[in-house]
Image (cartoon, rainbow, N blue to C red):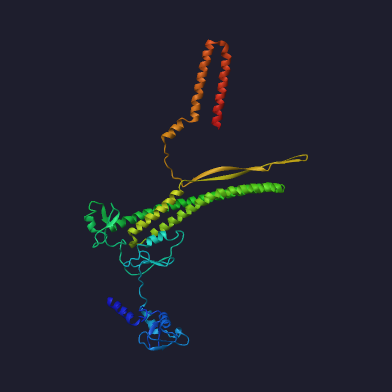
Amino acid sequence: MMKEEEKIERLRERILQCPICMDEYNDPRILPCHHSVCFQCLQDFVRHSSSSGRLFRCPQCRSDICVPRGGIKDFPPNFYVNCIQDELGSKPYFSTCNVCERDWLVSQYRCVDCDIDICKFCIHEHKLFKHDPSKTLNIMRIETGNMGTGMSSQKQCTEHSEHILSMFCSTCNSAVCIDCILQSHKSHDTCTLGKKLEHAREFLQKEMDSINTSVRSVKKTVEELDKLSTDIKDNTTHCIKDVRKQARDLTNTIDQIAEQQVKVMTTIELENLTPINNYKKSLVDFTNKAHSVCRFLEDLQEDDMSLELLECYAQYKTNVDAIRESIHNKNISVKKFTFKPGKFYSWKDINVFKFGRTKTEPNEKTFLHVPSEPKRTFRGTLKSIFSIQNIILVLVPTFMLITISRICALMSDETDRFPDAICGLFLFLYISLSAAVSYVKG
């Protein structure tokens, strides 16, 4: 098999190689001396070597060649070379990564949107951070044959360059070699790099399940928000209809009053819908990022597991968790309208008209509620004990007892002051009860 490949490669070098660019022919044109040159190479060669653009020498045999009247394009194509190329097929595509630019890494992916070649270790960061999560990735896998199954973009150990990284230290959270295990990481928790990536694969599967659960909750919340938005719009529309019906029977001045009422309600409706739309936008953003992570995890191949993947995922998960934290326990306050029509009164030449008024009823709802334990502080406990209401409830009975005891003393000593004491008692009771009732109502 290797001999046949060597023969094909030698055949390419002897027959299918352009004498100018030294690469395989691209649109070969045959010259009168029977030598062939790429069409683009021939154009550049004639432009730089001939002052008149009509006469030049063959780059191989140095024969004088005259350019046809129609120009370079009139040199006939070499159908013989084209047929050989069709039979042998094109050369396999090999390119280095345009992101990390490591010359020993062959790119295995190509991003059509960014027009770059990417290796298996840089593709994860490119998928998660370089594209809008709401759009579909347009990344092609390049068939480059068996390029190995490396588990990290770093081959050699930084401390022992003669050894490759084949172990993982969980204590230091880094890849190490065999000598590192026996020396600086001897007492640490270590395992093989393959086992570490196997555990990581299980962890990523659990992460995907958790994110899918969050996505389902968010979708349900979005449906509730849509329903709430519809109720608000219907309620607003109904009230506006009542207002307009009342206004149609009145004069132009009353029509202006009605339009003012409608404008106020429309403004409040916009104030109601603005936080809802902003919250929906946050939920959609979280859903897109969550879907992006799920697609990323679902598209992982067996040989995609690497330390760079885990690092990229940890960074991206931090962003997703921040958005998830911001959408939990979201309180949205809305105002619903109730319009009460007025009446028209007429007496002689005097007309009195009451248009009516619109009442707003606040309503608050919490979405994606996550219960949390309230923290009770010593200051809050003292504040609840020594509240104004509790102080009043203690002081009023106390003063009542003092007053009654004083009246009893007056009754026993000076009987002529007993009516004054009774009046003072009732006055004190009236003032105390009035103050208590006013505070409770307030």
Q: Is residue 340 visible?
A: no
Q: Does 396 sit left or right of 109 as displayed? A: right
Q: Quadrant of the N terminus?
A: bottom left
Give coordinates of residue 93: x percent, y percent: 36, 72
* Along the viewing direction, whichever of 153 and 204 lies nearer the viewer: 153
Of all residues, the one furthest to the left in this rendering is 182
Give coordinates of residue 208: x percent, y percent: 39, 55
Give coordinates of residue 134: x percent, y percent: 46, 59
* Along the viewing direction, whichever of 139 and 47 lies nearer the viewer: 47
Q: Quadrant of the C terminus?
A: top right
Q: Does 245 sit left or right of 204 as displayed? A: right
Rendered view: 128 above or below 27 = above
Q: Residue at x 47, y 52 (%)?
A: 283
Q: Does 414 sit left or right of 145 as displayed? A: right
Q: Residue at x 52, y 16 (%)?
A: 406
Q: Residue at x 35, y 68 (%)?
A: 96
Give coordinates of residue 22: x percent, y percent: 35, 79
